[in-house]
Image (tube, helix red, strand yellow):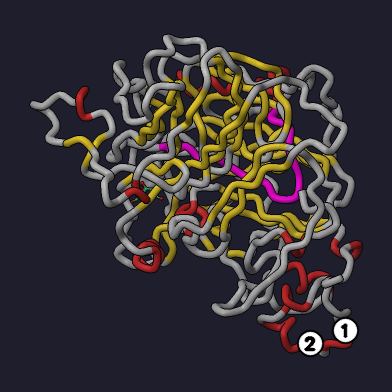
Amino acid sequence: MQLGTPWADGTASISQCAINPGDHFVYRFKVDKPGTYFYHGHLGMQRSAGLYGSLIVDVADGQREPFRYDGEFSLLLSDWWHQGVHEQEVGLSSSPFRWIGEAQSVLINGRGQYNCSLAAQFSNSSSSSTGQCEFTGREQCAPEILTVEPNKTYRLRIASSTSLQSLSLAIKNHAMVVVEADGNYVQPFSVDDMDIYSGDSYSVLFKTDQDPTMNYYISASVRGRKPNTTQALTILNYKPNSASDPPKLSPPVAPAWNDYAHSKAFTSKIFARVGSPAPPTSFDRRIVMLNTQNNIDGAYIKWAINNVSLILPPTPYLGAIKYKLKNVFDAANPPDDYDREYDVMNPPVNRNTTLGSGVYNIELGSTVDIILQNANALAANVSEIHPWHLHGHDFWVLGYGEGKFNEKEHERSLNFKNPPLRNTAVIFPYGWTALRFVADNPGVWAFHCHIEPHLHMGMGVVFALGVHRVGNIPREALACGVTAKMPMSNVTATNRG
Ligand SMILES: O=C1O[C@H]([C@@H](O)CO)C(O)=C1O
C-alpha cells in the first residue's frame, strides 16, 4: 500500500523520476498486508518488455491464514510480442496509428508456446498444422510443471501482469476455490474457470482428488478481445507420474472470448470474507468518469477520462506539489462528471479530446466514490474491457451495471454490506462499475486502466492528497525536471538508513 512511502510506489512522472540506464533506485517500504502481489516497470511499455515479477507477502510470525493447504505454487501470467517495445510505443503515438495487435504468446511464469502446442495430440489436423513442442536443447522454453501429490490441497497464487490480454485460467477436471483477491480475503467460492484481468491477483485452493494415474493441463486463454493467441498450457503432474507423460484428457475449453455473461457471473461471486470491515455508508465526493476513445488533432488516437487524456510531465507530481512548484503542470482539476446527455452506446459525435495532467486534488481522510462509465469506442459497436487499478489504496467494489449509471435507478443496487476490497476492478463493455475508497494515504497516486497501451494512450488520472504530510522524499526520486534544479538544502538527505 506504500503507507508513508509514496515515493517508493514506482510510477514515473507521478511519484518519482524514471530511473536512468545505469542508475539505481532503492525501493524501501513497509509490507503492510500478507497476500499475492506483483511488481512491474511503470514507464512506457516496460511490462510488454518483460519488466515484472511476483511479490508474495507471508503472514506475520505467529499469525495464520484463514484456510489451510499443504503446498503452494505461484503463477505469474503475462503476454509477449515479437515486435520490440519501442516500435510498439512509437506506433501507438504515430499518425497513422499503429495498434500493437494481439500478443504472439501468453506466458505462464515467463514461458509460453509459439508455433507448437503442448497438446498437439488433441489438435484437429485439418484445422491446425501445429506440431508438438520439442524442448530438447531449448529447456529454457519448457513450461514450469506443477508437481503435486495425490489427495492434498494446494494454494495457487495467480497474478496477471499482461500488457493487454484478459485471461481465463482453468485446471482440467479440478475445481478452484477462490480465497484471496488483490491481497484481501474473499468469501470462498468454487469455480471451474476464472477470469483474470491485467493487474488482478488471486489465490485459489484446489484438491488433487482426481485420477492420480494421469497428468492434467492447466490453461490460460485470451478473453475479452478476439483472440489471435493460442492458449498457454502447462501441466499439473501427479506424483509419481513422469512430468513428460502427456495428459490423456484434452485441455480445458475456455468460454468464448465475448461471453461477457460468463465474466459477469464470475465477478458477481466475489464478496469480502465474512468479518471484513464494511465501507463507510456515505461518501464525501463522487467522481463519475466517462471512458472514451478519441482523436487529438484529428489524427492521433487517445483514450480520455471526462474528455481529458493523461499526459505526464517531466517533473513528477509528488515533488512538484510538495515543494509548491509553479507552472510545472496544469493544476486545474479535471471535471468530476461528464455531460450525462452523452450517448455511451454510440461513437463520439465530437471525436476530439484534449491532453491534461489529470490531477484531482482529494481531501485527506475523505470517502470518495468513483463511478467508471464505459462507452462506445471510435468504431461503431465496439466497447472494450478496461481493468482499472488504484495505487496507494484499496477500494470496495460496490457494484456493476449495464448502460449508463443513473443515481435514481442504481444507487439502491449497490452493495454496502459485503463488497470485496480490491485494487483492480474491471468495467465491462457498455457498462459501469462503482467503487468507494477512503483517501487516507498521503501522496500522489495513479488510477488507471491497467492495459498498458491504453495507459500509454492517456487512460488514467491522478489523485493528490495530503501531500504536505508526506515525509522527506529521497533525492533519487527528484533527480529530474524542475526538482533536479532545486537547491539540495531544500531536500533532506536520502532515506538510506
Ligand atoms: O486502444 C486500442 O486501439 C485499438 C483500436 O481501437 C484502434 O486501432 C484497439 O483494439 C484498442 O484497444
For the point 70% across and 23% down, the residue is 186
For the point 84% across and 19% down, the residue is 275
Say whether marks 2 and 1 touch (CB < 8 Å).
Answer: yes
Residue neighbourhood size for the residue with mark 2, other residues' Cα within 10 Å, grouped as few (<14), some (14–19), many (≥20): some
Q: Is residue 438 magenta?
A: no
Q: CA distance from mark 2 to mark 1?
A: 7 Å
x and y percent of residue 257 in the render? 36, 28
What residue would you read off at disc 1? 490
Question: Does any portion of residue 161 appear in the rendered image?
Answer: yes
Give whichever of 487, 333 is nearer the camera. 487
Name the kind of residue labelled 1 in the image.
Asn
Residue neighbourhood size for the residue with mark 1, other residues' Cα within 10 Å, grouped as few (<14), some (14–19), many (≥20): few
**Tag 1, which secondary structure?**
helix
Give whichever of 46, 157 is nearer the camera. 157
Q: Which mark is residue 486?
A: 2
Q: Is residue 395 magenta?
A: yes
x and y percent of residue 412 in the render? 72, 18
For the point 84% across and 71% down, the residue is 495
Q: Above or below — where is 146 with respect to 438? A: above
x and y percent of residue 102 in the render? 32, 46
Instruction: Tell me which corner region of the image, top left, top right, bottom left or bottom right, holds residue 404.
Output: top right
**Tag 2, which secondary structure?**
loop
Q: Which mark is residue 106?
A: none
Q: Please state if 304 lies on the left or on the right of 275 as rendered.
A: left
Give whichever of 30, 74 is nearer the camera. 74
Give whichever of 352, 257 is nearer the camera. 257
Name the kind of residue labelled 2 in the image.
Met
Instruction: Tell me which corner region of the image, top left, top right, bottom left or bottom right, holds residue 135.
Output: top left
Quadrant the C terminus occupies = bottom right
Magenta part of the chain: 383-397
